[in-house]
Amino acid sequence: MATVFWDAKGVILLDILPQGQCINAARYCSTLDRLKEAIRRKRPGLLRRGVVLQHDKASPHSGNLTQQWLQRYGWEILPHPAHSPDLAPSDFHLFGPLKRHLGGMAFETEDDLISELRNWFDNLDVDFFRVGINSLLSRWQKCIDLHGDYVEK
């Protein structure tokens, strides 16, 4: 499983869960530690200005350990209504093109797949990421206008 943290400038962290391991709150907090370091390196000043993170309500994201981690570092959570892929930039903007890119490919090893993922993300134009993040505002507004109904049907 791959977890991708990205913003309007590109991928901040691509975290790969080793085969056979499960994601739980402790593992997710470890991923957030790596994200914090990646932000420090790739987005100087962002940690001081404040991090806004969007994730769903899956148990690793909503567990006490994760909530304590987020409170300790003062990260804000952008609400994500349940079952709303139309309001998650990774779902409505990132994963479709990634699936189309990977479609039909075969990889001999997990490392080959990871390498292809990294290459694909590295070769995306910054405008791709900017458009995805910027469209979130209009999608939220559409959802409000539709009284919480899906933005895309």
Image: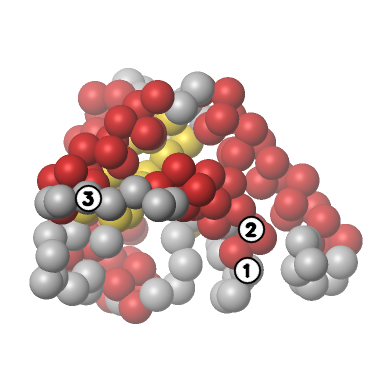
Specify whether 55 is left or right of 113: right
Real-space CA distance between mark 3 and mark 1, rounded to the nearest whole angstrom: 31 Å
**Residue at the location (69% across, 41% down)?**
135
Question: Looking at the rendering, in which quadrant would you find the C terminus?
Answer: bottom right
Which structural element holds mark 3? loop
The three-letter code of the residue at mark 1 reads: Ser
Q: Residues within 10 Å of mark 1 (few under 14, many from 20)?
A: some
Nearer to us of marks 2 and 3 is: 3
The three-letter code of the residue at mark 3 reads: Phe
Which structural element holds mark 1? loop
Tag shown at residue 107: 3
Residue 1 placement: quadrant: bottom left
Q: Residue 107's spot in the image, x, y percent?
A: 22, 50
Decide: marks 1, 2 in contact (CB < 8 A)? yes
Q: Mark 1 highlights which residue?
A: 84
Residue 91 placement: quadrant: bottom right
Decide: marks 2, 3 in contact (CB < 8 A)? no
Q: Mark 2 highlights which residue?
A: 87
Q: Residue 109's spot in the image, x, y percent?
A: 13, 51
State the residue lying farthest toward the right: 145
Real-space CA distance between mark 1 and mark 2, rounded to the nearest whole angstrom: 6 Å
Q: Residue 140's spot in the image, x, y percent?
A: 73, 54
Earlier residue among tags 3 and 1: 1
State whether residue 119 is above or below residue 67. Answer: above
State whether residue 32 is above or below residue 67. Answer: above
Specify whether 18 is left or right of 45: left
The three-letter code of the residue at mark 2 reads: Leu
Specify whether 120 is left or right of 106: right
Tag shown at residue 146: none
**Residue at the location (80% across, 53% down)?**
141
Real-space CA distance between mark 2 and mark 3, rounded to the nearest whole angstrom: 31 Å
